[in-house]
Image (tube, rainbow, N blue to C red):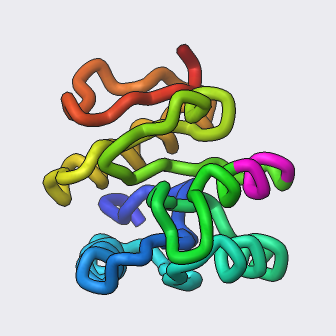
Amino acid sequence: MLFGRKKRRIEHLLVVEDEPLVAFDTEHFLRESGFIIVATVDSVADATRSIETEDTLDLVLADINLSDGSGVEVARFAFTRGLPVLFVTGNCPSDARALAAGCLAKPYAQRDLLSAIDAIEAVLEGGKAPRRLPGNFSLFLGG
C-alpha cells in the first residue's frame, strides 16, 4: 500500500484509571485513534493481573491514585516484564523516571496524549524523540 498507515509499534494498550468518566473518555478516544484497548481497569490488582495474562500489551497508561493502591506498584510490576508505562496523573511521582517511559500531567488535551504515545514509540523504535513535546509531558526514555 503506497499511502497506507504505518504499522504502529505501540498498538495494544492497558488503561489503568479509577475515575470512571476519565477512563471512559480515554478508552473511547484511543479506540477512535486506532489503538486496541486490551482492558480498562481501576485497581492495582486488576492491572497486574492484566499485565500477567495479556501477552499483546505494548504500553500501560497508569494513573497514580488507584482504588487499592498506587500506579507506582503497577509500573514496578510492568517494569519487571519489560513493559513501558506512561504515567497519566495530576502528580508525577519522584521515582517515575526509574519506572516509566514518561509522565503526562492531568489535565491534558487529547492531542497531548497522542503526542506522548508517539514520542515513546519513536524512542522505542530506536529513533529520537520529536523536538516538540507537550509542555505537560516528561519523556524519560532516550534522555
Instruction: Farthest residue to the top: give it.
Output: 143
Residue 67: % across, % down:
52, 76
**Is residue 61 or residue 95 the one in the foreground?**
95
In the displayed structure image, the side of residue 61 where residue 68 appears, left or right: right
In the displayed structure image, the side of residue 70 where residue 2 appears, left or right: left
Is 100 within the magenta?
A: no
Can I make out residue 7 in this image? no
Indicate the quadrant where residue 52 lies: bottom right
Indicate the quadrant where residue 56 lies: bottom right
In the displayed structure image, the side of residue 59 where residue 91 appears, left or right: left
Indicate the quadrant where residue 47 lies: bottom right
In the displayed structure image, the side of residue 128 where residue 23 appears, left or right: left
Quarter in which the N terminus is drawn: bottom left
Quarter in which the C terminus is drawn: top right
Q: Could you tell me which residue is drawn at 50 percent across and 60 percent down?
A: 62
Is 79 within the magenta?
A: yes
Q: Could you tell me which residue is drawn at 29 percent across and 19 percent down?
A: 131
Instruction: Farthest residue to the left: give it.
Output: 109
Q: Could you tell me which residue is drawn at 42 percent across and 76 percent down?
A: 18
**Is residue 112 or residue 77 the one in the foreground?**
77
Instruction: Farthest residue to the front: give it.
Output: 68
Q: Is residue 22 above or below residue 58?
A: below
| Magenta region, main secondary structure | helix
Q: Is residue 33 above or below residue 10?
A: below
Residue 115: % across, % down:
29, 44
Residue 66: % across, % down:
50, 69
Residue 82: % across, % down:
79, 48
Q: Could you tell me which residue is drawn at 30 percent across and 73 percent down?
A: 26
Can I make out residue 123 in this image? yes
Q: Magenta segment range?
A: 76-80
